[in-house]
Image: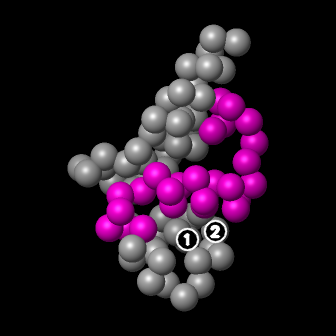
Amino acid sequence: MNQDINVTQQYVNALQRSDQMIRTFATHLSILKHQLSLYSDEHKRAHLFIKLKSELRIIITNVQSISITQDALIDLVA
Protein backbone atom coordinates (compact mmCIF):
# COMPACT_ATOMS: atom_id res chain seq x y z
CA MET A 1 0.00 0.00 0.00
CA ASN A 2 2.72 2.51 0.91
CA GLN A 3 4.58 1.62 -2.30
CA ASP A 4 1.46 2.43 -4.37
CA ILE A 5 1.08 5.77 -2.61
CA ASN A 6 4.76 6.57 -3.13
CA VAL A 7 4.67 5.73 -6.85
CA THR A 8 1.40 7.65 -7.33
CA GLN A 9 2.92 10.71 -5.70
CA GLN A 10 6.04 10.43 -7.87
CA TYR A 11 3.85 10.23 -10.96
CA VAL A 12 1.71 13.20 -9.95
CA ASN A 13 4.82 15.29 -9.24
CA ALA A 14 6.63 14.28 -12.44
CA LEU A 15 7.31 17.16 -14.83
CA GLN A 16 9.86 17.34 -17.60
CA ARG A 17 12.97 19.19 -16.43
CA SER A 18 14.29 21.95 -18.67
CA ASP A 19 17.49 19.96 -19.31
CA GLN A 20 15.76 16.58 -19.75
CA MET A 21 15.35 14.97 -23.17
CA ILE A 22 11.81 13.91 -24.04
CA ARG A 23 12.74 10.24 -24.51
CA THR A 24 14.31 10.11 -21.05
CA PHE A 25 11.26 11.77 -19.51
CA ALA A 26 8.81 9.53 -21.38
CA THR A 27 10.72 6.46 -20.20
CA HIS A 28 10.56 7.71 -16.61
CA LEU A 29 6.78 8.18 -16.87
CA SER A 30 6.37 4.76 -18.47
CA ILE A 31 8.24 3.08 -15.63
CA LEU A 32 6.04 4.81 -13.06
CA LYS A 33 2.83 3.98 -14.95
CA HIS A 34 3.90 0.37 -15.29
CA GLN A 35 4.23 0.18 -11.52
CA LEU A 36 0.69 1.52 -11.08
CA SER A 37 -1.57 -0.02 -13.73
CA LEU A 38 -2.14 -0.39 -17.44
CA TYR A 39 -3.02 2.65 -19.54
CA SER A 40 -4.32 2.91 -23.08
CA ASP A 41 -2.18 4.67 -25.68
CA GLU A 42 -4.59 7.62 -25.53
CA HIS A 43 -4.03 7.94 -21.78
CA LYS A 44 -0.26 7.66 -22.18
CA ARG A 45 -0.23 10.32 -24.88
CA ALA A 46 -2.45 12.68 -22.88
CA HIS A 47 -0.45 12.20 -19.69
CA LEU A 48 2.83 12.78 -21.49
CA PHE A 49 1.48 15.89 -23.24
CA ILE A 50 0.31 17.64 -20.06
CA LYS A 51 3.63 17.03 -18.33
CA LEU A 52 5.90 18.31 -21.12
CA LYS A 53 7.69 21.64 -21.16
CA SER A 54 5.35 24.40 -22.37
CA GLU A 55 7.38 25.10 -25.52
CA LEU A 56 6.98 21.47 -26.60
CA ARG A 57 3.21 21.57 -25.94
CA ILE A 58 3.01 24.63 -28.25
CA ILE A 59 4.86 22.77 -31.03
CA ILE A 60 2.56 19.78 -30.65
CA THR A 61 -0.66 21.81 -30.68
CA ASN A 62 0.46 23.45 -33.94
CA VAL A 63 0.40 20.04 -35.62
CA GLN A 64 -2.93 19.42 -37.33
CA SER A 65 -3.34 15.81 -36.24
CA ILE A 66 -2.62 15.24 -32.58
CA SER A 67 -4.36 11.85 -32.55
CA ILE A 68 -1.05 10.02 -32.94
CA THR A 69 0.60 7.33 -30.88
CA GLN A 70 2.77 8.19 -27.89
CA ASP A 71 5.88 7.11 -29.81
CA ALA A 72 4.95 9.38 -32.73
CA LEU A 73 4.39 12.23 -30.28
CA ILE A 74 7.87 11.68 -28.83
CA ASP A 75 9.39 11.53 -32.33
CA LEU A 76 7.63 14.77 -33.25
CA VAL A 77 9.37 16.82 -30.58
CA ALA A 78 12.58 14.84 -30.14
Residue 71 lies, in percent from the top left, at 56, 64
Amino acid type, label 2 = Thr
Q: Return the residue found at the far bottom.
A: 64
- Most extreme residue toward the top, as rendered? 2
Q: Which quadrant holds residue 43?
A: bottom right
* Number of disc labels: 2
- Would you name the residue on which mark 2 appears? 69
What segment carries the magenta color?
Answer: 33-57
The quadrant of the image that shows the N terminus is top right
Asked if the magenta segment contains residue 14, the reply would be no
Q: Tell me how far mark 1 sits from mark 2, CA to CA.
A: 5 Å
Image vertical order of residue 73 relative to residue 30, above or below:
below
Secondary structure under badge 2?
loop
Which residue is painted at 50% across and 29% down in the image?
10
* Residue in the picture at 44% in, 83% down: 62
Q: Report crowding for label 2: few under 14, some 14 to 19, many 20 or more residues within 10 A (C-alpha).
A: few
Give me the disc on residue 6.
Answer: none
Answer whether residue 21 is visible to the viewer in this image: yes
As drawn, 20 above or below 49: above
| Relative to 59, residue 24 above or below | above
Split into 4 quadrants, where in the image is the C terminus? bottom left
x, y percentage for residue 9?
Answer: 54, 27
Identify residue for label 1: 72
- Which SS type dominates the magenta stretch? helix
Q: In this view, does 17 lie above or below 43?
A: above
**In this view of the protein, which residue sits in the foreground, 71 or 13?**
13
Tag 1 near tag 2, CB within 8 Å: yes
Q: What residue type is labelled 1?
A: Ala
Q: Is residue 77 visible?
A: no
- Tell me what residue is drawn at x 63 percent, y 54 percent: 44
